[in-house]
Image (cartoon, rainbow, N blue to C red):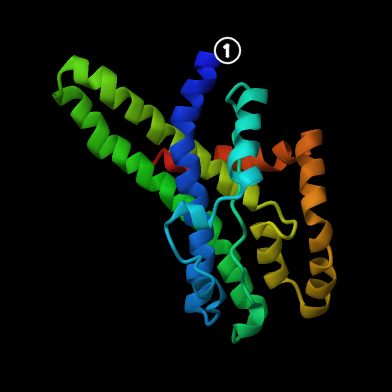
Amino acid sequence: MDLSNIVRHIVISAFPILIAIVFHELSHGFVANRLGDPTAKMMGRLTLNPIAHIDPIGTILMPLMLLILTNGQFVFGYAKPVPINPMNFKNPKRDMAISAAAGPVTNILLSIFSILILKLVIAPLSFLLPESVSSTVMTPLIMIFHSSVVVNVVLAAFNMIPIPPLDGGRVLTGFLPYKQAVLFSKIEPFGFFIVIFLIATGIASYFVMPIVNLFLRLLEFF
C-alpha cells in the first residue's frame, strides 16, 4: 500500500474506529452503573470524551499497523477497559454477563445507525446536490459511514470470541454453572496472550469472519 492509500484509509477509518471503541466501552460502564456498579462513573469513564478511553497501543498503534499490514482489509482496535466491580451487582454472574454483552450490542446498533444514515440521508442528498459537491463531500461521507458499518461489525464479532477478558468470554461465564464458571474465569489472566496467538496464527478469523458475514447479511435488511 503506497503512502497516499495509507493516508486515505486512515482518514476514512480513524473516525469510525474511534466512535466504535468509545461507545463500546461507554456502554459497558453505563449498563454496569444501571445494574448497581458506579465504579466507571466514579472514575470518569461515563463520558464521550475519547481521551478518557484511548489506549496508545490498542486505539492508535494496533489499528495503524493492521491497516498497513493487511492493506486496509482488516482493522481492529480496543480502548482502555472500563473498570467494573461485580461485587456491587445484586447478581454478579448474571449482571457481569449483561454488562459485557452491552459492548457488542452497541456496535451492532451503531452499524444499523450508519446504514440508515447512508440510505436515508447521504444517498438522497448525493442525488440532489450538484455533482461537484457530491464528489468532494458526499463521496467521502459514504466511505466513512461504510467503514463504520464494517468496523462496528468486526469489533462486535471479535469481542464475541468466548475467551475472557473478551466480552464473549464473560457472557459465557454468566451462562455456565457456578463451579464451571469459576474454573473458566481462571483463564482470564492468560486471555490476552491467547487472543494474540489466535490473531497471529489466523485462527481468530475462522471464528470472526463467519460472524461478520452473518451480521452483514442480516444488516442488508436495513
- The reply to whether residue 74 is in sight is no
Q: Residue at x 49, y 73 (%)?
A: 41
The percent coordinates of residue 136 (x first, y second) are: 27, 19
The percent coordinates of residue 24 (x first, y second) are: 52, 55
Pick the front one: 86 or 207: 86
Q: In the picture, which quadrant includes the N terminus? A: top right
Residue type at mark 1: give it: Asp
Circle 1 packing at 10 Å, graded few (<14), some (14-19), many (20+), is few
Quarter of the image holding residue 144? top left
Q: Residue at x 79, y 35 (%)?
A: 200
- For the image shown, how many numbered marks are present on the structure? 1
- The reply to whether residue 144 is in sight is yes
Vertical side of 10 occupied by 192: above or below: below
Q: Residue furthest bottom?
A: 90
Give left or right: position of 92 versus 52: right
Give left or right: position of 37 versus 8: right
Per the image, label 1 sits on a secondary structure element best described as loop
Q: Residue furthest top?
A: 2
Pick the front one: 119 or 61: 61
The percent coordinates of residue 151 (x first, y second) are: 52, 39
Vertical side of 3 occupied by 155: above or below: below
Q: Residue at x 82, y 61 (%)?
A: 189
Q: Residue at x 64, y 77 (%)?
A: 85
Q: In the picture, which quadrant includes the C terminus? A: top left
Vertical side of 61 occupied by 89: above or below: below
**Residue where numbered disc 1 is placed:** 2
